[in-house]
Image: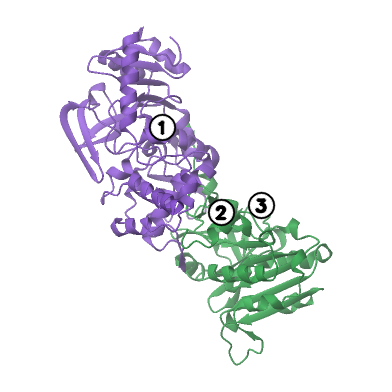
Amino acid sequence: MQEIVGSKLAPTPAEILKIITETPDTKTFYFKPRAKLEDPKPGQFTEIYLPGVGEAPVSISGVDYDGVIVQTVRSIGTLTEYLFKLGKGDLIGIRGPYGKGWPIEKLKGRDVLIVGGGIGLAPLRPVIKEIEKNRGDYGRLSILYGARTPNLLLYRYEFDEYRKIPNSELLLTVDHADETWTGNVGVVTQLIPKASVDPRNAIALVCGPEIMMRFTVKALEKQGFKENQIYLSLERRMKCGVGLCGHCQVGPYFVCRHGPVFPYWMIKKYFWVDQI
Amino acid sequence: MFLGSLYSGGVSELERLFQEIKNMNYRIIGPRLEDDVIRLGDLRSFDEIPYGISDIQRPGYYRIRVDGGRFRNPLDSPKRLLYPPELTIFRVTRDWKIEYPEYRFEKTALFGVKPCDLAAIRIMDRVQGELGDEYFLKMREKLLLVVENCVEPGENCFCATMGTGPVASTGFDIAYTRLDDSTVLFQPGSDLGVIILGELNLEPATPDQIDAFKEAILKASEKARAGFRLENLPDMLELNLESKVYQEIAERCLGCANCNMVCPTCFCFDVIDEPELDGSSRRVRIWDGCHSYSYAQVAGGHFRKDLWARYRHWVLHKFVYWLRQFGSFGCVGCGRCITWCPAGIDLREVIFKVVKEVEERCRR
């Protein structure tokens, strides 16, 4: 009898509908899969495939009408370099969505503190959109966002929209200012004491470089956040995305399956160990 | 004939058993000599099994000798059959059709595998039962397991410590033990095993033979031990994540991932793209190992840049994380990673040292 194996790893072709240039090295792609994917939850990711090149995991930064998947990509490796050569109407492969996302249910009725570093705001954008859409379900919203330089901030064209969300604030910072910048200068953790959420009844959602997340956790704990009030989205090499290939392990967890979003208490033991 | 009971025969009965399985149209895979190494491969006849040839396995050392002795586990583990090193999973055509290769899964018998490798198959059952690799699961359904119990473990064997050998207790179809040149004891372990062995008209083993069997197994158990114990081992290792032992090992480790490749339970894979001349792309699953440099590398970063961290991950996965992921240790004590390490790094010694550091710290 003939059998099929490997179907779990088969991509669906998707058309590029739109590309937005975010920063010199980052673009947001709108992908329309030929077969509709399962509805993504905020914080999940997909595997993007280019024939002859390979696959890479990319977080989902939004869902547009009719199953269009929005993903913000930084050109940093082989696959993304080729992806950046594609244009509107070109096809890519996509599979997913995968992983456990942000704890949306837990956020209801509570203050939400979003801390993003650089490209790390991408998987947090769907949370902002969700809160905006169902504003009454959530408490105060603080968005703290930092990047190395002002021109590396993502979604600048939406900042005014974020600021208009009732009962919310958007605090920005950059490591290095230029002549256009009039706001905060410094790392994003410096904004944490300024956030006007109530640490006793807030959940913090954090995504950014590992080093930034470590300092963020320290700063949050200083403000009174407990380890079950902090959620982190980890980056690892999620090669297969479905918990088969082993590459993305952190301690006993497969980041693709048990994460990428983890409550801090779950990974605390490994989070501080160098190269675990 | 009763499940689990011992029956007496000789080498000719063993050969008849082989023939019986062959007559049932099984593809038979077992140990065979290839280029002075005992490998796992297709056996056309019973004579191909290198009985009478012994292997000498030490850290970073492997030799064979034609001396009428015994051989231990072959270089290849059953993983090579059940979870091939290279497997085309599908082809993506120019117009984005997914074309799956046509795999046929035949009835296959593993003849003469060792208890450690049986244990490894059972660990893989749990791993793939959880993760669900389709190729493995389909191969596994068709598998007949004939196990050879070990009465002479090698220098690198530590199955007795891991509780996986030297005798197989469950999960096989048929087990046999070559007590000496003339006596082979047979044991059916499944209904199918009972049916197949039933064809041989064997007599129940005599009380003397059973005593000799027990004695041989006891002796073998004493030999196949490591210097560490399993009791509290995961906790001990986790208490010493920052151990300097890993850094000492990394001084010698080459990061070649041989240990990952020969390990009967290591399951990590990569998928690579093979572009074809017709414009299609073949997606090929290949074994990968946590010792290789690129394993935890991502575009723009690296999560285990240092070799000591990759070595540590391997140890922790096998002896700590595996328990939490799949309910058992990820090591069966086959010793292949010790034999086939070009630097002769001895996993048993590494664990012993890391644990000892914790014990000494506690005493202080």
Are discs 3 and 2 located on one and the same chain? yes
Residue in the picture at 58% in, 71% down = A215
Residue B84: tell me if it is visible.
yes
Give the CA separation, mark 1 to mark 3: 43 Å
The picture places residue B161, in percent across and down from the top left corner, at 39, 35
The picture places residue A184, in percent across and down from the top left corner, at 65, 85
| Quadrant that contains the N terminus of chain B | top left
Q: Colour of chain A?
A: green
Q: Residues within 10 Å of mark 2 (few under 14, many from 20)?
A: many
What chain does mark 1 sit on? Answer: B
Mark toward the viewer: 2 or 1? 1
The picture places residue B301, in percent across and down from the top left corner, at 46, 67
Residue located beneath label 2 in the image: A256
- Amino acid of disc 2: Cys
- Amino acid of disc 1: Thr
The picture places residue B243, in percent across and down from the top left corner, at 41, 57
Q: Kindly indicate the quadrant of the structure image that contains residue B332.
A: top left
- Amino acid of disc 3: Glu
Q: Residues within 10 Å of mark 3 (few under 14, many from 20)?
A: few
| Quadrant that contains the C terminus of chain B | bottom left
Placement of B281 over or under A183, stated as above or below:
above
Residue A263: tell me if it is visible.
no
Residue located beneath label 3 in the image: A38
Give the letter of the purple chain.
Answer: B
